[in-house]
Image: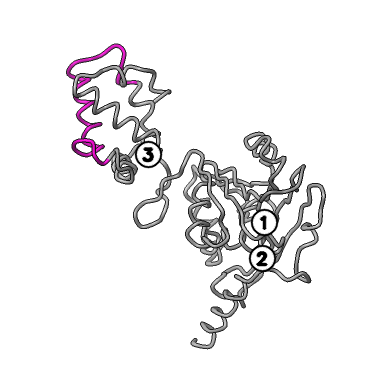
Amino acid sequence: MKLRALMASAALAMAALPASAASVHECAQAVSRCDGTISVPLNWNDPSSERITVAFAWLPAKDAAQGTILANPGGPLPALPQIPTLQQALGPVLDRRNLLVVEPRGLGKSSPLLCPGLNLTAPETISTCARLLGPRAQYFTADQVVADMDAVRRALGVPEVTFYGNSYGTLYAQAYATRHPGSLAAAFLDSTTITAPDGYALWPMRTRLDLLDLVCERSRACRELPGSASGTWTRLVAHLRAQPDAEVPLSSLIAIGNSLQQPVFGREASAAATAYLRGDQAPGRRPWSSV
């Protein structure tokens, strides 16, 4: 066991080294979109484990490249079909930045996990799928995905990346930043998926006031508001039940419930609720979609 641990540590150390000229993937020399694959271990902590294939697309900048954007559109869904959407979101930035999109393992062209007949509304098909996939399914996780992403970065000879993540893609961005900080120039999170204090995402997403407290605690301005964020929101709902306000119908609060765990939205909503309860209704009466 000690020998295997030493071998794993050595392999991980080697993986952190820059790619040599001989090992650089052919896509690194492309002048237009290049789709490729690399072989990676099923379990990055065990280099001798089964090998799987991870697919990616490399889109060189239109002009002289000033860096590389590693992007994931979220889901979790296959990423490669969403490249046009990513290009639209990033716009003219791609004139001077390369775009790298890595298909997360288990999806699309990256060793997909397939369960014929799976129906997420039929529990018996889910248990059948679990038996079919077996124990190897435990390695199709965010920590392994970002190790794949960093392996593609090395294979292309890219020194560092800026990670653009949308929705569930922000979970990959956070995982990448935690595990590969030396390869990260910056990160841009769009529609952030919240991670709990233990570092894991809470899934499925749903209205949870403890998440409102979590995003508020991570902001100095929000922390300085009186009471807890969840308590303030609860008091606002109770107040509006007792004293209805046509400009702040309870239905509007219900509609935004699933957005309270979004950092910016949750903090702004907490500030608006605090102001409303203090007698300043203006922030709470503006359209909640703009909060």
Q: Which residue is mark 2?
A: 52
The amino acid type found where label 1 is placed reads Ser
| Cα separation between marks 2 and 1 | 8 Å
Q: Are marks 2 and 1 in contact (CB under 8 Å)?
A: yes
Question: Start and end of the magenta stretch?
Answer: 223-251
Q: Which residue is mark 1?
A: 110
Between residue 4 and residue 204, name the one nearer to us. 4
Q: At 22% from the left edge and 31% from the top edge, which residue is drawn?
A: 234
Q: Are marks 3 and 2 in contact (CB under 8 Å)?
A: no
Return the mark for residue 261: 3
Q: Is residue 52 magenta?
A: no
Task: Say which label, 3 or 1, has the lower sequence index.
Answer: 1
Q: Quadrant of residue 36?
A: bottom right
Between residue 155 and residue 55, name the one nearer to us. 155
Q: Secondary structure at mark 2?
A: strand
Q: Quadrant of the C terminus?
A: top left
Q: How is the image coloured?
A: one colour
Task: Say which label, 3 or 2, has the lower sequence index.
Answer: 2
Across and down, in percent, residue 12 comes to 57, 74
Across and down, in percent, residue 113 comes to 61, 56
Q: Is residue 227 magenta?
A: yes
Q: Residues within 10 Å of mark 2 (few under 14, many from 20)?
A: some
Asked whether, in this view, residue 42 is left or right of residue 274, the answer is right
